[in-house]
Image (cartoon, rainbow, N blue to C red):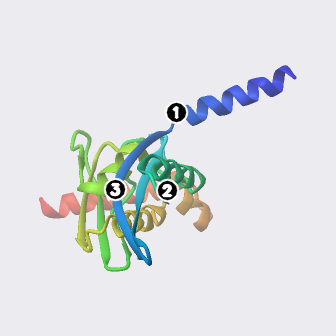
Amino acid sequence: MAQQSVDQHNKAERKEELVEKLVHVNRVAKTVKGGRTMSFAAVVVVGDQKGRVGFGSGKAAEVPEAITKATNEAKRNMVRIPLREGRTLHHDVSGHFGAGKVYLRTAPAGTGVIAGGPMRAVFEVLGVQDVVAKSVGSNNPYNMIKATFNALESINSPRMVAAKRGKKVGDIVARRENSNSKSVAEEV
């Protein structure tokens, strides 16, 4: 019995760690026989600021209910994203969804989050501290978030690449550092 209550307490603590950000609320009017019925659609991004993030959308007659639905969906749809040094992406990547395209670039320490609107919310709850992002095409928040997730899910950490190739992480990281030093030497 004591172990069960401790587990429930730990689950409650984990859920409290999550950071929720409301990205967009939209008022939707549906025309019916008796007139118009108003409802609200909300988009929420949830993350633990340690590499886990999810998004969800909810629709209801009242704004708080829509936000609650969106938050619950976001918690169910969380994914883990590998981060370099816990502050930036491992490599530059692009993603798209519909007409929305996003380009995400790694950045040196101290750069901060240079991104607009919905992408900024995703990076803040993900825990990324240094990134440069650009959105091209659609500025619809739904498409921008889905394009951002498309890009983030295509990120490979050196550990993942090493596992695919059957090599050690050191071989892959050393190769990347050697190619960077060669390009610097060529420039000089």
The secondary structure type at the circle numbered 3 is strand
The residue at which mark 3 appears reads as 24
Q: Could you say where residue 47 lies in the image, as x and y percent from the top left? A: 47, 45
Residue 100 quadrant: bottom left
CA gap, disc 2 to disc 1?
A: 28 Å
Q: Could you say where residue 62 lies in the image, as x and y percent from the top left? A: 44, 51
Picture layout, residue 41 above or below residue 17: below
Q: Residues within 10 Å of mark 1 (few under 14, many from 20)?
A: few
Image label count: 3
Of pointers 2 and 3, the one earlier in the residue sequence: 3
**Which residue shows up at 60% across the image and 34% down it?**
14
Q: Is residue 67 left or right of residue 112?
A: right
Give residue 106's mark.
none
The residue at which mark 2 appears reads as 158
Q: Residues within 10 Å of mark 3 (few under 14, many from 20)?
A: some
The answer to whether the residues at label 1 and label 3 have Cβ atoms under 8 Å apart is no
CA gap, disc 1 to disc 3?
A: 22 Å
Q: Residue furthest right?
A: 1
Q: Nearer the viewer, residue 157 or 181?
A: 157
What's the amino acid at mark 2?
Pro
Viewport quadrant of the C terminus: bottom left
**Which residue shows up at 44% across the image and 54% down it?**
173
The residue at which mark 1 appears reads as 17
The secondary structure type at the circle numbered 1 is helix
What's the amino acid at mark 3?
His
Task: Report the mark closest to the observer, 2 or 1.
Answer: 1
